[in-house]
Image (cartoon, rainbow, N blue to C red):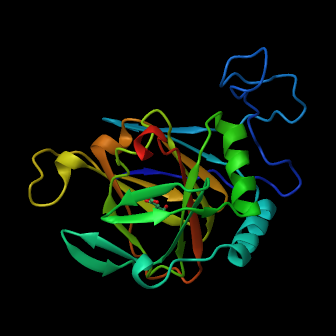
Amino acid sequence: MESFLNRPSCDNNSRCPQKRVKLQSDEGMKPGEVDEEDEFSHPVPWQKIESEGLDCDYALLLCKDEADKMFKQLEEEVVYSTGEDATVQVFGKVHSIPRKQAAYGDAGLTYTYSGVTRLACTWTPTLEYIRDVVTNTTGQTFNFVLVNRYKDGQDHMGEHRDDEKELDPFCPIASVSLGAARDLIFRHRDARGKRAHRQIKPVKLELAHGSLLLMNSPTNTFWYHSLPVRKKISLPRINLTFRRILLERKK
Ligand SMILES: O=C(O)CCC(=O)C(=O)O
């Protein structure tokens, strides 16, 4: 398995490294261009993760102190789904999800995946803050976030692709991790299960506290990803996947 190691956490005295990029609304610069004059401009040390049809960028977005603070605030603010809203449908069968989940975003937005439709709750202050940090770092805007909370290493997420038609294909899925470091495994669609007809190595990535992973197109066309059980992990983790949902498809 291809394995990518994390960089060590940024030290507590340094500013958190955030690349200041121009947004479409900023005048005089092209979107995505870095403002070298900006005193808050600190390049993010991005790590490129590539394989056939897989294109991801990984970086430490928040230093430990800020990541700790964000985790604590999210623990106070996020309200997770319960009952029927905490289930998914796979091949027509209803399953309760082996973790907690919540959906936040712009007013009235819904997102349908795994046979269920989630209505977005209004952004909390911390989700809005992290969304804006991700936007300032990447130049991309997001209108929805799926929050997944894993109480310990028993909680997990099965193999899937984030390839719903309602997602803007030109916008990466931006995944922010807080809390216990967990492995994310990518597996090529042609190399999965009994029907595998090609030998393509899976790609393993350990997602650190305060990290940002960008899953760029066409990753979610060719590669499935999962967060497997890790029995030795006793601490919780929160993952935020910021997405851009196409509004035209909603009408
Ligand atoms: O918790 C994670 O890192 C995985 C999240 C994920 O795969 C998803 O939200 O689609």
> Which of 132/218 is in front?
132
> Which of 64/174 is in front?
174
Q: Exactly how many numbered labels are in the figure?
A: 0
Residue 41 in the image: state x and y as whole percent. Answer: 82, 33
Residue 118 in the image: state x and y as whole percent. Answer: 46, 65
Left or right side of 72 for 244: left
Kindly give the residue lying farthest to the front in the view shown: 251
- Image-quadrant location for residue 45: top right
- Image-quadrant location for residue 33: top right
Residue 180 in the image: state x and y as whole percent. Answer: 59, 71
Image point (43%, 46%), residue name: 250
Kindly give the residue lying farthest to the top in the view shown: 28
Task: Tell me if I can see residue 44 in this picture.
Answer: no
Image point (22%, 48%), residue name: 189
Residue 11 in the image: state x and y as whole percent. Answer: 81, 55
> Which of 201/121 is in front?
121
Task: Tell me if I can see residue 24 in this picture.
Answer: yes
> Which of 2/209 is in front?
209
Image point (46%, 32%), residue name: 170
- Image-quadrant location for residue 27: top right
The C terminus - image quarter: top left
Q: Is residue 212 above or below residue 177?
A: above
Q: Is residue 128 above or below residue 218?
A: below
Left or right side of 125 for 4: left
Left or right side of 226 for 44: right
